[in-house]
Image (tube, rainbow, N blue to C red):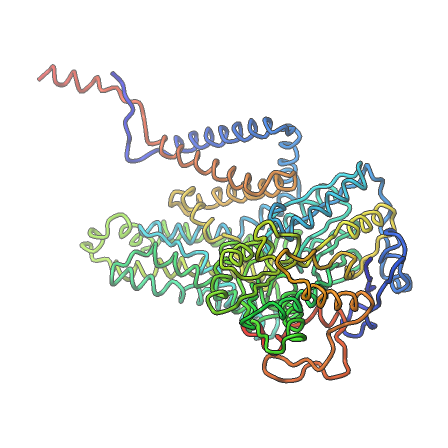
Amino acid sequence: MTRTFPVLRKNALLLPERRRFLKGAGSLAAGGLLNPLAAHAATPILSLPPVKEEDALVAFGHTGPITDGGWDTAHDMGVQAVRKAFPRLRTVYVESVPYSADATRIFRQFVAEGANMVLGTSNYGDFIKDVADRAPEVAFLECDGTSVTRNLGWYYVTHWYPSYVIGIAAGLMTKTNRLGYVGTFPIPSVFASANATLLGAQSVNPACTMQAVSTNSWFDPQAATQAATALADSGCDFLCGITDEPAYLRVAESRGLKAAMWNLDMRRFGPNAYVSSVMLDFAPFYIEQVRARLNGTWKAAGNFLTMAHGVDRDIWGQTVPENVRTQADAMRDRILAGYSPFQGPIRDNNGAIRIPAGTTMNDMAIYQWDWGVQGMTGLG
Amino acid sequence: MSRFQRFPTAPARRILVCRAIAILVSVIVVSLLLAMSGRNVGELAHLVLTSTIGSRFGLEDLALFMTPLLLTGGAVTVTRRMGLWNIGGEGQFYLGAAGAAGVGLFIHGPAILILPLMALAAMLCGMIWILLPALARAFADVNEIITTLLLNFVAGLLVYWLATGPWRDRVTGALASTERLPVSIPDLWGVVHWGFPLALLIVGGLAAIMSSTRWGYEVRISGASAGMARYAGMPVRVRIISAMLLSGALAALAGMFEVAGTVHRLQGGMADNFGYLGIVVAVLARGSCLAVIPAAFLMALILDVGIVLQTQQVAATVVLAITGLVLLLVAIADECAHYRVVTPATGRTVRKAS
């Protein structure tokens, strides 16, 4: 299930409070697209004409190799699900699309080859928007994007909720009270992930702090290994992060530490260190979006994939004690019931109150988080 | 008995013939490999041709690829004439982009004034970046290959720092970058901006400077034999520094064109290896400034074909291997062109006569 923000309401913090779709809410096809918010979005949105499945081409640009065992593998599983659901549809993909003018070239080439729908599995910003603006007949979707135009929308997972749940486990399991975070770039999705984990840990263990390192890459196993080693050397005994691959789990395993991952189940790379993972599942969303494009009902929008509908914590690792599981899962249940743990007062890492008491950060506010919470070093 | 003998020089026509054979061989090898992996080579070839040189869309992309390659290739060629290697094109590219972005972000005014100012700032930054290696080379004989190369990493990280730190635009998603620059180089033809004809003009001008000015003559002589140039009273040190500064300015200008023409934001990784590819272009051009144009075209074509192949599900690593194969075979062809069959019959007759 996804929540859809229509074009005219794109403007971040003016959005209505988070809404949750609870159990039994509709089929996939009825998903985000038919929800009432999108329905009365005013008009500059123009739906693209329907395409026959056998005539259609859907193209995916992946940010890393689909064999990375993480982010891109997760997206590729979504692509495979699309292939299964639409066996006559043609799909193509390109791996390791760089964040440079080459991305524009690759997306342009997709358009030139007749793609009806182009998905970028990362935020390519202007590189995808420039192509979308010149190809009004093609539907574009960008993961982790920010712009919505008449033929370009975005989608993202609300990974901060499972991160908070895993953070509770981290707070209970750390002995040094120092968490290490292998970050990529100092950007909102990284702030959201690191902050959520730290806030979760502090909710059960207020002494927790987090040391973050930015590697300037989403896929650089060597840099991630070095960063994780440095964090371990500085006394962190619980590693988490947001890299596309499992390198820091191996470090945690060999150093006898604990690690929480993201993207997929990665326990085979470090069965003793593995605590859990922020699990991603793009398949239902991709199927829903492609179906809408084929039916001619696709509309550009911003979409959040919510907890238990595209993102969740993984089954706990074998070394996670029972009481930790119970305590963390209690929060998971509350979140699933509509609770948000992102409530004020939340202080930044200079000690200033940024979210006053009585205020809840909604998903759009979290999606644009650009400061580190109290106890965070190395980020913000 | 006749045998192969290496000659120190090779005529241009021979090199061209050998290279044509090399490219043909690489096309055959790649086609065979693709056919063996079960792909329809005919269809693929048709698509590759129409998507590169066979359509306006393809030609636009080629011109966009060529623009920075012309300048970074020209930058390396200038130092080649001096007998030096500027491996630091990537770093100077980054510095140029940073300098240009700094002007674009913080000085506001009409584009007609801001764009030249951005170009000037970029070239100045590029020259500053190569100044230290140039001085070290001219006065302390420090190998410029190492110094220019290592400064690339410093420059790359500097741009990451600017884009993720003080100049960061706080709304971008997966990669930190600055805000979009308010000015951009106007488009000339589709997505091709005016940087393309300018780059062609600059390379043409460079060829003229090299072949018909006193400065160019002195650079060429100093490159051929520094000792002789010194004996002839030429200021070799000054020529080393000036050639390297010019080289840095050219690579930096490529960075300005890229940031103001195609990317519009300063961000880490934006150099896309154009600095290093400039070295390949210069090697292909064999030190001739005019030959930088066809060399940049060939490189752009290879890169563009790579993108088409990627959208046809050929992995990026395979594309890289194909690029490597083409360049390897061209390098072998260049060497082969130096060899000719010699029949040492004349030698024997001379000995008999004496």
Q: Quadrant of the N terminus of chain B?
A: top left
Query: In the depicted view, which residue is nearer to us: B349 or A166?
Result: A166
Residue A232 lies, with reference to residue B87, above or below; the image says below
Residue shown at 12% from the left, 18% from the top: B351
Which residue of the protein is positioned furthest toward the front in this rendering? A322
Task: Provide residue B308's location: percent of width, then percent of height.
Answer: 62, 41
Residue in the picture at 87% in, 51% down: A29
In the image, farthest residue toward the left = B354
Q: Is residue A237 left or right of residue B217?
A: right
How many numbered circles are shown? Answer: 0
Percent position of residue B164, x then y: 56, 68
Lateral position of residue A344 relative to residue A70, left or right:
right
Q: Position of residue A164 (x, y in %)?
A: 69, 68
Q: Quick check: A198 above or below B333?
A: below
Judge by depth and name the residue closer to the eye, B171 or A279: A279
Give above or below for A25 relative to A203. above
Would you say B131 lies left or right of B174 here? left
Is residue B322 shown to the viewer in this render? yes
Q: Is residue B103 visible to the viewer in this orientation of the structure?
A: no
Where the C terminus of chain B falls, by quadrant?
top left
Q: Quadrant of residue B104?
A: bottom right
Q: Nearer the viewer, residue A153 or B66?
A: A153
Answer with the quarter of the image where residue B91 lies: bottom left
Depth check, front residue: A3 or B9: A3
Which residue does the image show at 69% across and 60% down from the upper left? A144
Where is residue A64 drawn, in percent x and y?
60, 50
